[in-house]
Image (spheres, rainbow, N blue to C red):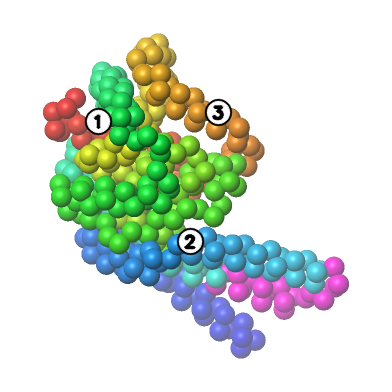
Amino acid sequence: MNMFRKRRMRILVLIIVIIAISIFGFNPARVETVFSTGWYPGFSLVQRNITGWIPFSIGDVIYLILFFAILFSIYRFIKQIITRRINKHSVYSWAGRTVIILLFAYIIFQVFWGLNYNRLGVVHQFKLKDPGFDTTEILRLQDYLADKVNSSKKKLSSTEVVYPSREVIFERGEQVYHKASIFFPFLQYHPASIKSSLFGRIGNYLGFTGYYNPFTGEAQVNATVPKFLLPAITAHEVAHQLGYAKENEASFIGYLASINTDDALYRYSSYLDLFLYTNAQVNRFDSLAAKKVYKKLNDSVKADINEWQEFLLAHRSLLSRTTGWVYGKFLTWYNQPDGIKSYDGVVALVISYYKKHGVL
C-alpha cells in the first residue's frame, strides 16, 4: 500500500505542475516575454550545441527505442494475461507507471518547447494587422507568386547544374537564416541541428515531410521527397527550432527567411511552396482563375509540380489519412482550430505582411 500511496502522490504532484504550466500559458504576452523570447532561445541554443555536431538524428534513435520498449511492454502484459499471472495489483502498478510517464513527458514537452503554441507570435513581432484577406488580395498574391516562381526557377536553372546533396542544402539553410537575421535579428540561427529523418521512406506513407523533436532540439527533414522541396521544408523546420510552433507561423518565417537571401535554391523552393498553398485556396472559390495562373508557369516549374503530385499519389495510403487526422486533432488541441488546414494560414500572414509593406 505504501508503494501505491507514493505513486498517487507523484501523480498528484505532476498534475499540479501541469495545472501551473497551463495557468502560465493562459497569458500569451507572458509566454512571449518570459518563455518564447526569454527562456527558450538560450535553452534551444544549448540543445543544438549538444546534438548539432552528431551526424544522425539522436531524437529518431530515442523514438525507435521507445517504440520497441512500448511493444515489449505490451507483449509482457499480454503474456501475463495468457499465462494468468496477472492480478489487480499488477494492473494498478502498470497503469500507475504509464500515467506517470505520460504526465512527465507532457511536462517536458511543454517546458522544452510546447508553450510556444501560446505565444503572441509573428503578428505581434511584425506588428501585423489581424491576418485576413479578400478575394482581390489573394488573386494579386497568386499573380505575384507566379511571376516570382518563374523568375526564381530561371535563375536557379542558370546557377545550379544539378541539385546539391541534402547535407549541402542543410548547410545553406543555416546561411539563409544568418542573412535573414540581418533584417530580423530574432532569426539568428547558430549552431544548426538539421538532420535527415531515419523514417523518411516510412514517412512518405505516413504523410510527413519533416518534423521538430522538442526533446533533442533537432529539425528532421524527410530527405526522400523531391529535392526541390527540401529547402522550403528545411526553412520551415528551422523556424520551429526558433520557437515558432504554429504551422502557419513556421511556414511564414521560413518563407520570409528564404526570400531575403540570394540563394536561388531556397528562393525558388519557398516561392513555389507558397504558390501551391495560394493556388489551392484560390481554386476553392474560383477554379478558372487558379487554372489561368497555373498556365502562366514555365514548363520546368510545371514539371516539378507534376513530379510532386505523382510522388504524393504513389505514396497515398490509409496510414497517411489516419496520421493526418490524428495530427489535425493535435493542432486543434494546441490553439490551431483549423487543424491540418492551419498550414494554409501562411497565406493570410504573407498577405498581411505584404499589405503593410505596400507590395500588394
- Mark 3, Cα crowd under 10 Å, few <14 / some 14-19 / many 20+, is few
Q: Kindly state the secondary structure of the residue where label 3 is placed.
A: helix
**Vertical placement of 218 versus 252: above or below?**
below
Q: Kindly state the secondary structure of the residue where label 1 is placed.
A: helix
- Describe residue 255's horizontal placement relative to residue 64 as left or right: left
Mark before the other along the chain sequence, 2 or 3? 2
Q: Amino acid at mark 2?
A: Phe
> Residue 163: where, in percent of width, then height?
40, 39
Task: Give the farthest residue toward the bottom.
Answer: 2
Mark before the other along the chain sequence, 3 or 1? 3
Q: Amino acid at mark 3?
A: Glu
Residue on which disc 3 sits: 310
Q: CA distance from mark 2 to mark 3?
A: 29 Å
Q: Nearer the viewer, mark 2 or mark 3?
A: 2
Examine the rendering and report whether any part of residue 223 can be seen. Answer: yes
Residue on which disc 2 sits: 56
Q: Main secondary structure of the magenta part?
A: helix
> Residue 54: where, in percent of width, then height?
43, 66
> Residue 276: where, in percent of width, then height?
39, 28
Between residues 262 and 28, which one lies in front from this camera angle? Answer: 262
- Where does the magenta region start and end? 82-100
